[in-house]
Image: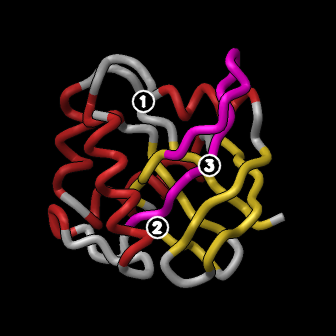
Amino acid sequence: MSDWNQQIIDEFRANGGTVGTMGFGRALVLLHHVGARSGTERIAPLAHIRDSADRWFVAASKAGAPDNPDWYHNLRAHPEVAIETPDDGTVEVRARVLDGDERDAAWARFEEMSDGFKGYQEKTSRVIPVVALERR
């Protein structure tokens, strides 16, 4: 997986945020996060929804796996992070996990964006977290 992620990261950076692989286009951000235990900086390419000029949503879907992705745990431990975006370059953000109606409304937008997200929720018994990344 890390080789695939690195390929996506390299393509994102080489093409100004556009990723042709799997038809991602400009729908990805690169999340810079810090390991909850290790303190090591990592980068994860993630599908996003731009909610406003200062807020992006990402979903901790992990393709419908029974557990949350590592980056989600890292954001909970270290919520002040940065993202590389197709339109704004690198942006300092603060991660906030959405809950209740706010989470449900954001998740519905992911399902509208891609049938893949609908399938992810059907594959798992956990409620897939949605995180708002808000400009600092």
Mark 2 — residue? Answer: 49
Write the residue at 50% across / 26% down.
70
Mark 3: amino acid: His
Residue 40 highlighted magenta (yes or no): yes
CA distance separating discs 1 and 2: 18 Å
Q: What mark, if any, has residue 127 been given in the picture?
A: 1
Mark 1: amino acid: Val
Residue 109 highlighted magenta (yes or no): no
Compare residues 51 and 135 and report the one nearer the observer. 135
Q: Nearer the viewer, mark 1 or mark 2?
A: 2
Quick one: SS at disc 3?
strand
Horizontal arrangement in the rendering, residue 25 relative to residue 94 (left or right): left
Q: How far across and how far down the image is residue 46, in percent?
A: 42, 53
Horizontal arrangement in the rendering, residue 24 relative to residue 51 (left or right): left
Q: Nearer the viewer, mark 2 or mark 3?
A: 3
The answer to whether residue 34 is above or below residue 131 is above
Neighbourhood count class around disc 2 (C-alpha, 10 Å): few under 14, some 14–19, many 20 upward: some
**Magenta region: which residues?**
28-43
Which mark sits nearer the N-terminus, 1 or 3? 3
Q: What mark, if any, has residue 46 been given in the picture?
A: none
Mark 3 — residue? Answer: 32
Quick one: SS at disc 2?
strand
Provide the major secondary structure of the magenta segment: strand
Which mark sits nearer the N-terminus, 1 or 2? 2
Compare residues 91 and 101 and report the one nearer the observer. 91
Write the residue at 18% across / 50% down.
116
